[in-house]
Amino acid sequence: MANLTIRKLDDAVRDELRLRAARNGRSVEDEVRVILGEVVAGQPFEVPPAAPAPRPQAAVASANGLARVTLIIGGGIAAYKALDLIRRLKERQIHVRCVLTKAAQQFVTPLAASALSHERVYTDLFDPESEFDAGHIRLARECDLIVVAPATADLIAKMAHGHADDLASATLLAANRPILLAPAMNPLMWNNAATRRNVLQLRRDGILTVGPNAGEMAEAGEAGVGRMAEPTEIAAAAEHILRPPHPRPLQGKRVLITAGPTHEAIDPVRYIANRSSGKQGFAIAAAARDAGAEVVLVSGPVDLADPSGVSVISVESARDMLHRVEAALPVDVAIFAAAVADWRVANEGEQKLKKTAAGVPALQLVENPDILATIAKLENNRPPLVIGFAAETEHLIENAKAKIARKGCDWIVANDVSPATGVMGGDRNTVHLLTREGEDISVDSWPVMTKEQVATELVARIAKAVETKS
Ligand code: C5P
């Protein structure tokens, strides 16, 4: 098989190729495969399914929060299985609204589809009741996914050519949601060059398919590829699109995070604190949980709801925080996002301090334990990846570099917390990630992001580092 070096192509050809690939949402290499597939007539289905052309996916939230499917039932013998598909979708907590083509009504009745979906069924493009407010547009948009089952050769041909002369085809043409086809037809129709061209075109347009499977046909003695996928397969494919499984790169890993300020008591009612909101640490905890980690979040006093699925330990002072952090070891990753008070009052009052004639009380401060440095310098049980934060108001990178060395951690997330940045208590953060490899420290500066985005990016970097280490 000859290898083609894209760099050696004529400039104009290369530019055109890049443009075509970008337009179709494919890599240049895949685009070349598609073009070659087109040239080698008769092989269109061997072409690797191109990355679907991007389709707008924004969903309109339904009142009850269920995912919603508009199910278009085409006219083929497999239509009877579409009734079972309604049940399989509903079992998966998916709300279903059906459109039946005229041909479909030769096989199943609107009444049966309505009884199973518990919804009104739509059949007519010119139905005055549903079209007074452009019903086909609503059917196309008020859902999260459109499933066509069975997708007949005729419906596929209409879609490929942009026809809109009945409710089903008009709905499909007006759609801005993902579309999943479950083709079903006689093997000769499926293998017909016209159908193959049409399916290839639809795949390029970003339309998804499930099946058809090989097997016996309704027609006596006929077998081959063309049987509609089973309702359970179609429902599973629909659910996969509606609720894509999250990658869980931190599955099986234990992650410890500190967050928020600490409160250092002066007396039973007064304390020293700082302006940390805890938002960044909480966002990291949620992102680590979403990545599959078992998360322990040791937090100072904050005004935030506990993230679900995270074990939250609430503390007040730096010393409490250190004890709870030590008790949570061993962990695979420890992230110290808390704004721990550097000092506490040495002579904490047992009773509320009073104004006296003797004048203003003198508060003597002593240094708090440095939790990050303590854990980073442990001989036993040191987490394999220890990450600190450096909130600075000047000489950000310089100070962060010094901190990474002084505290003995592996990474530092440095951010400028000067009042003008609005970072303290705000929702956005501009951070620089410093990573240490032996004596070398690299700095990666990230653009302004929300604290959730910073968390997601940081967790992605952690997942990569954990994978490399193991
Ligand atoms: O020294 P500084 O407060 O700037 O250090 C910031 C980093 O050290 C943060 O990761 C913070 O959570 C951690 N730290 C700590 N214990 C302290 C002080 C800071 O864990 N007493």
Image (cartoon, rainbow, N blue to C red):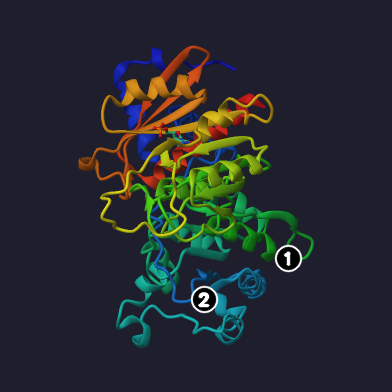
Q: Residue furthest front?
A: 357
* Label of residue 408 in the image: none
Can residue 59 be seen here? The reply is yes
Q: Secondary structure at mark 1?
A: loop
Q: Secondary structure at mark 2?
A: strand
| Front residue of this view, candidates 423 and 363 | 363
Mark 1 beta carbon near ligand 1 (under 8 Å): no
In space, the residues marked 2 and 1 are separated at their CA atoms by 27 Å
Whether label 2 lies within 8 Å of ligand 1 gets the answer no
Which residue is denoted by mark 2 in the rendering? 98
Left or right of 457 in this view: 397: left
The residue drawn where x is 50% and y is 30% is 33
- Residue 219 tag number: 1
Residue most extreme to the left: 420
* Residue 240, above or below 94: above
Going 35% across and 43% down the picture, which residue do you hit? 363
Whether residue 171 sits left or right of residue 214 in the image: it is left
x, y percentage for residue 403? 42, 24
Q: Quadrant of residue 182?
A: bottom right
Q: Residue 361 placed where, x, y %?
A: 31, 48
In which quadrant is the C terminus drawn? top right
Name the residue at 56% across, 30% down: 374
Disc tally is 2
Q: Nearer the viewer, residue 438 or 143?
A: 438
In the image, what residue occupies the spot 33% across and 48% down? 275
Residue closest to the far right: 221
Mark 1, other Cα within 10 Å: few <14 / some 14–19 / many ≥20: few
Residue kind at label 1, given as amino acid type: Glu
* Mark 2 or 1, closer to the camera: 2
Q: Are marks 2 and 1 in contact (CB under 8 Å)?
A: no
Q: Earlier in the sequence, mark 2 or mark 1?
A: 2
Q: Amino acid at mark 2?
A: Cys
